[in-house]
Image (cartoon, rainbow, N blue to C red):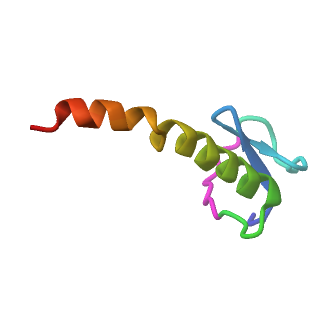
Amino acid sequence: MTATIDAIYEAGQLRLLKALALPEHTRVRVQVQTIDGDAERAEWLAQGERSLAKVWDNDADDVYNALLAP
């Protein structure tokens, strides 16, 4: 059987968006392909970048850089 089914990656696990018609304990092979244009994923990444920018680029670092300069 070959099937294409959408899933969401949450808390380290893939959660299928619909059930598969397979008997329990059936071994399967999973191939992961991200879906372009996933608005939720794009927002999650953007929030992470904004959060990192606040920590990474700030005026307080200039004080430490001046102390480290020869």
Is 39 magenta? The answer is: no
Residue plotted at (63% across, 35% down):
12
Quadrant of image for the N terminus? bottom right
Left or right relative to 24: residue 12: left
Choose top left, top right, bottom left or bottom right for residue 35: bottom right
Residue 6 pos. (x, y %): 81, 58
**Dominant SS type (magenta):** loop
Residue 55 pos. (x, y %): 51, 36
In the displayed structure, 35 sits above or below 12; it is below
Residue 36 pos. (x, y %): 72, 70
Residue at the bottom extreme? 36
| Range covered by the magenta-colored residues | 26-33
Left or right relative to 20: residue 44: left
Choose top left, top right, bottom left or bottom right for residue 9: top right
| Figure label count | 0
Residue plotted at (22% across, 29% down):
67
In the displayed structure, 13 sits above or below 20; it is above
Choose top left, top right, bottom left or bottom right for residue 15: top right
Foreground: 70 or 25? 70
Quadrant of image for the C terminus? top left
In the displayed structure, 5 sits above or below 56; it is below
Residue plotted at (74% across, 66% down):
2
Is 31 magenta? The answer is: yes
Residue 11 pos. (x, y %): 68, 32
Residue plotted at (78% across, 62% down):
38
Left or right relative to 70: residue 54: right
Foreground: 52 or 54? 54
